Every structure is written in C-alpha cells, then in structure tokens.
Amino acid sequence: MGFELPLFYVFAAVTVVASMLVIGQRSPVYSVMLLIASFAALAGLYVLLDAPFVAVIQIIIYAGAILVLFLFVVMLLNAPKERGGRRPRLAAGPRRLGAALGVVFAVELVWAIWRVASLREPVEAAVVLPAEAIEPVRWIGQVLYTDYAFAFEVTSLLILVAMVGAVVLAKKHVQ
Amino acid sequence: MVSLNHYLVLSAILFAIGTAGVFLRRNMITVLLSIEIMLNAANLMFVAFGRHFGAVDGQIIVFFVVTVAAAEAAVGLAIVIALFRLRESLDPDVFTSLKW
C-alpha cells in the first residue's frame, strides 16, 4: 500500500535519465549499455502496470537479444567515436521549417495528453480486471492464438524475411 | 495511485527524447537506438491503455511491436554494416549519393 507511486517515480526517473544519457553519449558502446539500464527500468514499470508477461519480454527479447545484437555490431565494426564540432549550418529556410515542425510536434503531444485527461470515463472501474486476468499469461495466450492468430502467423513470415534480408545485406559480395 | 496520465506523460517524454536523438546524433547506431526508445514509448502507452480499459489487447500489440523491432534492428544493423564497409564511417552525413 502506497509503494506504487514512489516506485513509479524511481523507475520513471531511471528510464528518462538513462535515455537522455543514451542521446548524450559520443561513444556507441556506452549508449547501448545505458539503453539496457533504461529498458530494465521500463520492465519495472510494466510490472507496476500488472503486465508481467510484457516485463519478461522486455528483459529477454529487448535487453537480452536486440541490444546484445547492437553491442555485437558496435564491437564488430570497432565503431569510432563520433567526431566533435558542429554540423554544417542549414540555410535559414529549412531551419525555420524545422523549428516550426518541432513546435507542432510539442503542441500535438500536449494536446493528445490533455485530451485523454478530459476523456477519463472508466478510470477506477476498469482497474478491476476480468476473472481470466488472474492468470495473465494464460489469458494473453488464449487471445493471441484465437483472435490474433492471423497476425501471429504473418509475424513469423516477417521474421523470416528479415532474417534472409539481413544475411543478404550484410554478406560480402564476391565477384 | 498512479494514474493513466502519469504513464502518458512519461511516454511522451521518452518519445520526445527518441525523436531528439534521431535528429541530433551523427552516429547511425545511436540513431537506431533512438528509434528503439521511441518504439518503447509507444509500447508503454499500449500497456497503460490496456490496463486502463481492462483489455489484454494492449499487451498483445506490444508483443507484435517487439517482433517488428527485432526485424527492424536486424535489417537496420545489416545496412549499417554494409555502409560501414563501403565508406569506413558511421556518420549519416557522409552518405549523400542519393541526395538530389
């Protein structure tokens, strides 16, 4: 009782700070490591959201597989640090357009959150999950293999295509 | 009590950080990492809304997003490797042959 809010703030702070450091790093190895920390904190947030399945997926697939793949590539390429200095300055026209688009983006985000805040119908009522939710993973499996069966099969095709594509793209071309 | 809005604001912040990373960094690997941050911001919002409406669909969509993210990372990194072989650089500003 009462642990939820402090935990939320701790996990949220770790996620945001680690993500900002990811962006702030020059060296890609540190970026990948910090992103793993950020995703671990996100997994904690998923536990707070009563989604243990997603939390476990986040750790095993994201932190364990995808980011390790990134790490492998960084080390394989012996990736150089980003060089310092400023980018060549854009002309005034594109710069103004970019600034305007940035403002539009910020306004959109604020507007979307504000709209949801004014929508809140089933706030507390919906927190009472249906009876099936007592075993969340079984519930997910049931819906995934019935309602989402087609999407699930298509996903396997997508993985196959990505695998073949990655091999073809990354292989050395021999004349 | 943590409300839906807490999660939405956090998700928006993460998405903004990811967007900033895509535009600010000059390293293709960090740009791909920023895209992962944006995907995770969207995932967080899916799960938060799923809990809010008492539906499991949000978590299932996260499952599909993670799958697509894995495919994207594999193909993206393969392209990065191919480009690095070509120019010995990870700076996206170096690759301008398709620029008009």
Image (tube, coloured by chain):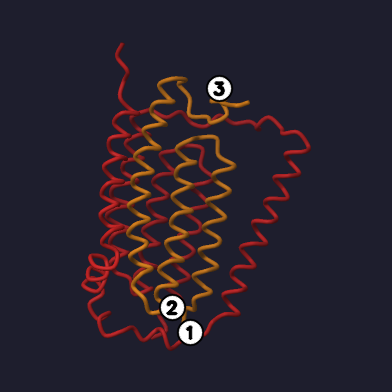
Quarter containing the C terminus of chain A: top left
Q: Tag 2: Cα neighbours inside 10 Å, few (<14), some, or many (≥20)? A: many
The reply, left or right, for residue A62 in relation to residue A25 is left
In depth, the one of A138 and A160 nearer the eye is A160
Q: Name the amino acid, label 1.
A: Val
Figure chain in orange: B
Residue under numbered circle 2:
B52
- Subunit of label 1: A
For image coordinates 38% across by 68% down, the residue present is B58
Determine contact: label 3, label 1, CB under 8 Å.
Answer: no
Q: x%, y% of residue A23?
A: 52, 46
Q: Position of residue A55 (x, y in %)?
A: 32, 64
Tell me which residue sits at (34%, 57%) in the image: B64
Q: Are marks 3 and 2 on the same chain?
A: yes
Circle 3 residue: B97
- Which residue is under mark 1? A123
Q: Colour of chain A?
A: red
Residue A45: horizontal and vertical position, in percent? 40, 68
- Do callouts 2 and 1 mark residues in contact (Cβ within 8 Å)? yes
CA distance for labels 2 and 1: 7 Å
| Viewer-nearest of discs 3 and 1 | 3
Image marks 3 and 2: residues in contact by CB distance under 8 Å: no
Q: Residue at x 50, y 57 (%)?
A: A17
